[in-house]
Image (cartoon, rainbow, N blue to C red):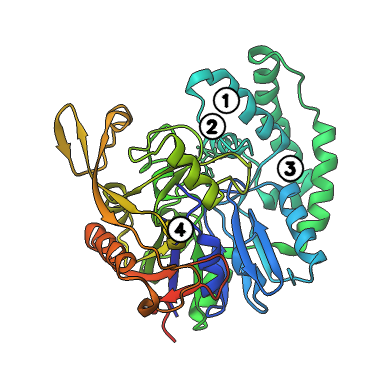
């Protein structure tokens, strides 16, 4: 059986957790391939509300395994507290596997994330402060520590940590003028992590290959969003991994030919957390109203999210970068009751119309949105479970987004729970 991917089409927080949970009952395994516990995926099911940062959202389904691939960076403290939280609510986590090749977010990466952000001053990225960037930097600099290293403390971990700390401590003491990190303190933590995580640490590339060869299906769970991709996003205001579909092949050891469908999740409007350009951003009273109505505050950091209208230029770019086979539109219900809704259909810079998402961040910052206004709807879309239940104006809004992006909307989400979903077209057959 092939793999199907559900990824973020915008700046993250599109509602991927709910969509993955909705689809996970149809697959054998749900797999994360990039990012770390900077993500925040919310799942609401009959057992209540779950906020997951690292563990794939499919874990809430019995018998569905969860895989954290080599492309993910893992904070062992965060992982253990998530495992404990799920365990205390009766969720079976024995089928969670973590790639031995995944890199470890060490306590010094978290300190470094904060120091670097402070040093950047007004140019700070507005990271989640989880040590994501510094961990990926170490991976590429070849001084990172991998989860598998925890299982060979004397032979691999100690020499690698000694090397890493010689660089880090020079940086801490000479550049940032803060206290150095103590090797024994870190080793003590590593021993605890190794004991508890050992049963979960596995060669996940092999597990994935065996699943696919055994006619099992897997769902790839994207984190963050395409516009935060380190290559394809609004650099440098991006995360340090590849949330777009290319990241899945690298971050799992997966042959691209195995991926039968790539679906991106989009909110019916836009949000962004942290710094960086957002052409269709709304400011003022209406933005506050939208933010409060939608409760747009970060699952991971609690920060207020910036809000804006749906940006069809950025969405079209996302479609192209990922070769999307479908879209999911979430939070349509949030737009219920507005007298009018707008879609950004182009940008204007220095009197020139632009229909493409520019790579030059300075230019993107100067882009003014060109809007198309649509009449709103009074009848609720909230909790609708069939397209025929949607008010006519809501349906034409959905159809217009499809037309502008050039991609079919396969699921519409009309509320946080599994049931509040309109399945327009099957994403995973069978
Ligand atoms: P980092 O991933 O913590 O390094 O943060 C880099 C940028 O990505 C910041 O603007 C964050 O707010 C943003 N970011 C990271 N993870 C998420 C997410 O899951 N949702 C939304 N934004 C995120």
Judge the density around disc 2: few (<14), some (14-19), many (≥20) Cα neighbours within 10 Å: some
Label 3: which secondary element: helix
Discs 1/3, front: 1
Q: Are marks 1 and 2 in contact (CB under 8 Å)?
A: yes
Q: Residue at 40% x, 49% y: name it.
A: 226
Q: Earlier in the sequence, mark 1 or mark 3?
A: 1
Marks 1 and 2, how far apart at CA:
7 Å
Q: Residue at 72% x, 36% y: name it.
A: 107
Q: Is mark 2 within 8 Å of ligand 1?
A: yes
Residue holding disc 2: 126
Residue holding disc 1: 117
Of residues 38 and 245, the one nearer the viewer is 38
381 on left or right of 88: left
Marks 3 and 4, how far apart at CA:
27 Å
Q: Earlier in the sequence, mark 4 or mark 2?
A: 2
Residue holding disc 3: 157
Judge the density around disc 1: few (<14), some (14-19), many (≥20) Cα neighbours within 10 Å: some
Q: Earlier in the sequence, mark 1 or mark 4?
A: 1
The quadrant in which the C terminus is found is: bottom left
Q: Earlier in the sequence, mark 1 or mark 2?
A: 1
Marks 4 and 2, how far apart at CA:
25 Å
168 on left or right of 378: right
Q: Which mark is residue 137?
A: none
Of residues 190 and 282, the one nearer the viewer is 282
428 on left or right of 311: right
Q: Which mark is residue 248?
A: 4
Q: Residue at 46% x, 37% y: name it.
A: 285
Discs 3/4, front: 4
């Amino acid at each position: 059986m092939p793999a199907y991917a559900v990824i973020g089409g915008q700046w993250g927080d599109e509602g991927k957790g709910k969509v993955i949970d909705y689809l996970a009952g149809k697959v054998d395994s749900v797999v994360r391939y990039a990012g770390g516990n900077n993500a925040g995926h919310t799942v609401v099911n009959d057992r209540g509300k779950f906020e997951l940062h690292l563990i794939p959202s499919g874990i809430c389904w019995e018998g569905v395994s969860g895989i954290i691939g080599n492309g993910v960076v893992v904070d062992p403290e965060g992982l253990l507290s998530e495992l404990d939280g799920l365990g205390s609510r009766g969720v079976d986590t024995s089928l969670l596997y973590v790639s031995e090749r995944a890199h470890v977010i060490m306590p010094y990466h978290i300190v470094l994330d904060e120091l670097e952000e402070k040093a950047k001053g007004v140019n700070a990225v507005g990271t989640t402060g989880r040590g994501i960037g510094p961990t990926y930097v170490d991976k590429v600099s070849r001084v990172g520590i991998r989860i598998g290293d925890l299982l060979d403390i004397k032979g691999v971990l100690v020499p690698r940590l000694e090397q890493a700390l010689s660089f880090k401590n020079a940086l801490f003491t000479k550049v940032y003028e803060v206290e150095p990190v103590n090797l024994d303190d870190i080793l003590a933590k590593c021993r605890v992590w190794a004991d508890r995580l050992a049963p979960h640490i596995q060669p996940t590339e092999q597990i994935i290959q065996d699943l696919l060869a055994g006619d099992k299906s897997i769902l790839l769970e994207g984190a963050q969003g395409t516009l935060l991709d380190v290559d394809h996003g609004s650099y440098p205001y991006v995360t340090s991994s590849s949330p777009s579909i290319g990241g899945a092949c690298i971050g799992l050891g997966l042959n691209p030919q195995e991926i039968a469908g790539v679906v991106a999740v989009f909110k019916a409007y836009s949000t962004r957390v942290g710094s960086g350009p957002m052409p269709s951003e709304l400011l003022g009273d209406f933005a506050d109203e939208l933010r409060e109505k939608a409760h747009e505050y970060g699952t991971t950091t609690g920060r207020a999210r910036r809000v804006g209208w749906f940006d069809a230029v950025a969405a079209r770019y996302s479609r192209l970068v990922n070769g999307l086979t479908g879209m999911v539109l979430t939070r349509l219900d949030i737009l219920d009751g507005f007298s009018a809704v707008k879609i950004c259909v182009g940008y204007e810079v220095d009197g020139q119309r632009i229909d493409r998402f520019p790579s030059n961040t300075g230019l993107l910052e100067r882009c003014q949105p060109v809007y198309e206004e649509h009449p709103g709807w009074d009848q609720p879309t909230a909790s609708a479970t069939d397209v025929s239940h949607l008010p006519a104006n809501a349906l034409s809004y959905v159809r217009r987004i499809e037309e502008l992006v050039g991609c079919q909307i396969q699921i519409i989400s009309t509320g946080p729970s599994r049931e509040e979903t309109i399945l327009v077209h099957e994403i995973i057959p069978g």
